[in-house]
Amino acid sequence: MSSEPFIPHNFNYPYMWLIDFSLTTLLRTVHNIREVHISESDKELLRSLNKERLIYISNHPSIKEPPIAYYVANKMGARFCYLAGREIFDWGNGFVGVVLKNMGTYSILEGTFDRESLKATRKILSSEKGKLALFPEGEPTSNQNDTMFPFQPGVAQLAFSGLEDTKKVEPNANIFILPAFVKYRMQESLDDMQKDIEKSIERLEEKLKLKLLHGSWVERLIAIGEAVLSDFETKFSIKSNKNDSFNDRFENLKNSVLDQIADKLSLKRWNLKDSTVEKLRKILSLYDSVHYTDSQKNISKKDVEWARNYCQKVYDFISIDSNYIKELPSPERIYEWIYRFELELFGSYKPRPMYAVVRFAKPVSLADHYAKYKEDKKKTMDTIMSNLRKEVEFLMEEEIKKSLRLV
């Protein structure tokens, strides 16, 4: 494992050609994604952007979106660079980092002003045909394909910084932002899927020693969630009001755990009123600061490792919401809950066969907004990020409408 704070990217073409050749197999083996669907009109759009400077952005509910972005780059006939948290490069005793680096991925220190990473980003975007894949939801991922966290504002700032650098030597330069939405759908037949869901729920109920319920799958999953929740409350010495709803109890659990961590680490400027996502981001970002910089001298590596492990419980259940599954008990939403409970109760889960649908909104030309950016940078960037999120949300809502209701 490297202790260097910044890991630069590399295009190892023989290595990448091997990945290109085996990408379909890798998607199936690692994520059980059997196919990736992109419409012919969208493939034509991708090819038309081959020679442009480009930032590709998409929703980010899981760890599957970066390899999907690699697939998109192949269809474009281009190579993307990717930005990843510094910690990821040490996974698997550094093996994951070697793989990512040689596929065009470079690091960023989460929660810090990373000059080296910013410099690399601007260089990529100002280079001829420079392309970068970013996920503006950031970390943590929600594990919900039908929702999105707020977009972080840095995408527009990076894009305009790259454009400013480029215009110094190429006055008519442009950078496009391409919004995408990735939707995962189960691929098994309805009959096979129903049998697997029933078997999976029964297995969870048996593990928790629950009496086999005869309600709907949604009711039984919520009962499983309540049992898991009660166990968490006991482990973390958290008291709940008997009149509190399932969702209120989960929210109280997540906030209480994160507040306990912040208190033990003596974190400054900790706001009890922040959302669980904001709190979790603050704690997770400490890992990079403690391990690769000297900016957190009051927190030991041992303490931040403890905090990281403690946070995992919150991370696994960050978006548990009974309304989500009641509103639309689709195969995908039911499996999202099953996966979480399998991970908690059995230590792992095996993704069922699925396929990915990738859709694109109209690319945004930053050159068209450059004059307004020079007049009012913040307003222009806020407007662009708001519009980009609306475009991705529109694609998401269209895909939600196509979902099958099982219950």
Image (cartoon, rainbow, N blue to C red):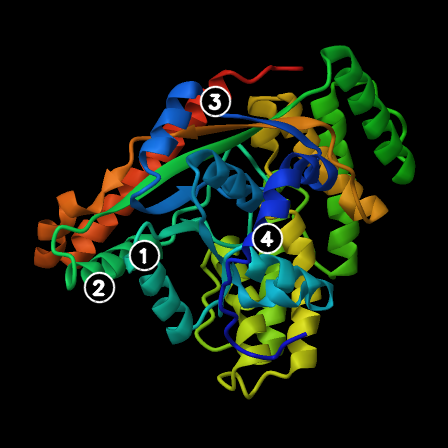
Mark 1 or 3, which is nearer the eye?
Answer: 1
> Element type at marker 2?
helix
Q: Residue furthest front?
A: 14
> Element type at marker 3?
helix
Q: Residue at x 87, y 40 (%)?
A: 208
In this picture, is 293 found above or below 319? below
Q: Amino acid at mark 1?
A: Leu
Q: Position of residue 251 (x, y in %)?
A: 58, 49
Q: Dot 4: few (<14), some (14–19), or many (≥20) neighbours within 10 Å? A: few
* Numbered circle sitting on residue 125: 1
Mark 4 or 3, which is nearer the eye?
Answer: 4
Quote the CA–CA distance across marks 2 and 4.
Answer: 31 Å
The image quarter containing residue 26 is top right
Q: Residue furthest top?
A: 191
Q: Earlier in the sequence, mark 4 or mark 1?
A: 4
* CB contact under 8 Å: marks 2 and 1: yes
Residue topped by disc 3: 399
Q: Earlier in the sequence, mark 2 or mark 3?
A: 2
Quote the CA–CA distance across marks 2 and 1.
Answer: 9 Å
Residue topped by disc 2: 165
